[in-house]
Image: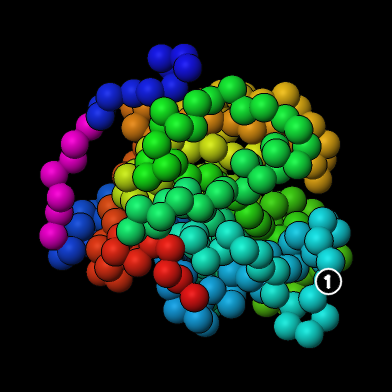
Amino acid sequence: MSKDFIWEDLSRPRKLELGENLAKAEVLASGDSPDHNFLKKFNLILATTERDKARVFSLRHRVFCEELGFFSLDLADRLEQDAFDTNSLHCLLEHRATGLAIGCLRVVMACDSKGDAFPIPVEKHCRELSVEISLDLKAVGRDSLCEISRVAIPKFFRSGGKDESLATDLERWVFGQHERQDFLMAGVALNLCATALSGISKRYHVLAMIEPRFQRLLARVGLHFEQVSPTVELLGLRAAFYIHQQRAETELSETVRPLYNALRINLESQFLREGIGSRIGIFH
């Protein structure tokens, strides 16, 4: 196993009380830069209630089933779910003023809070496709391993408003209230959220099954994923990629670091308030 895959604890931030966390997040989000303004308009929340998780699954159905045709339509409930959702942290990006969901993602844990191991999607896909992952997962340890997946943004927003074919009246109205750049930032914000959540949950070794071209886009903001499998056909050309969360934090571009810091503090407050660390693997 390459030494590049194992990193020492690069930072041991002081734990903040919830009140101090929230106060710092508000200060960080109160500036006038585009990143700060993003958090004035949009909010990232951990989806822990049945209602919020249903919003996540509904958005995923729209993107992956209706728009992209990756999975079968659920004509009864219009929810896209799978077996990995139970052992995942789900995050929802919403418009503050209206509560409109404009993006979501999940961080799938390879081990629950009791130490019981679970497979993660990239392992399943690579095994089914007879593809080797050039990363010693046993050496990494299940309790520090996770996967980012199901990053979803409706086509109307991810196209910067160019494709209105499936947009709702509310979505058109919300888009018209803000700059186009605000919505193009959504994908960056979601990936920063995933970086923060993997650190907050102490799952420092992060895998993702992504398109190589998307990896190059993430590298522009300092998220340098390393390809650890051959490229295969899986809902498009994809490969397994790896990043160490603590290293990622040190390499973030200065242009997104204020946004990342504010997101991390806010998400950590939610994580501690909900007691999620002791419930990983028992979400229903």
Magenta-drawn stretch, dominant element (helix, strand or loop): loop
Q: Name the residue furthest bottom.
A: 76
Where, by quadrant of the figure, is residue 170 drawn?
bottom right
Disc 1 packing (10 Å; few <14; some 14–19; many ≥20) = some
* Residue pointed to by mark 1: 73
Task: Determine the residue positioned at 25% across, 63% down.
Answer: 272
Image x and y of residue 188, in percent: 54, 44
| On screen, residue 242 above or below 68 | above
State whether residue 183 appears in this view.
no
* Count of numbered marks: 1
Indicate left or right for 14 with 92 as reference.
left
Task: Determine the residue positioned at 70% across, 37% down.
Answer: 126
Q: Is mark 1 on a helix, strand or loop?
A: loop
Image x and y of residue 197, in percent: 39, 50
| Nearer to the camera, 62 or 27 | 62
Image x and y of residue 95, in percent: 52, 68
Indicate left or right for 39 with 13 as reference.
right
**At label 1, which amino acid type do we have?**
Leu
State whether residue 231 appears in this view.
yes
Q: Is residue 97 magenta?
A: no
Q: Give the range drawn in magenta.
A: 11-17
| On screen, residue 110 above or below 103 | above
Task: Determine the residue positioned at 54% across, 74% down.
Answer: 53
| Nearer to the camera, 149 or 159 | 149
| On screen, residue 256 above or below 169 | above
Image x and y of residue 21, in percent: 20, 57
Task: Determine the residue positioned at 33% across, 59% down.
Answer: 114
**Colour mapping used in the image:** rainbow
| Nearer to the camera, 177 or 284 | 284
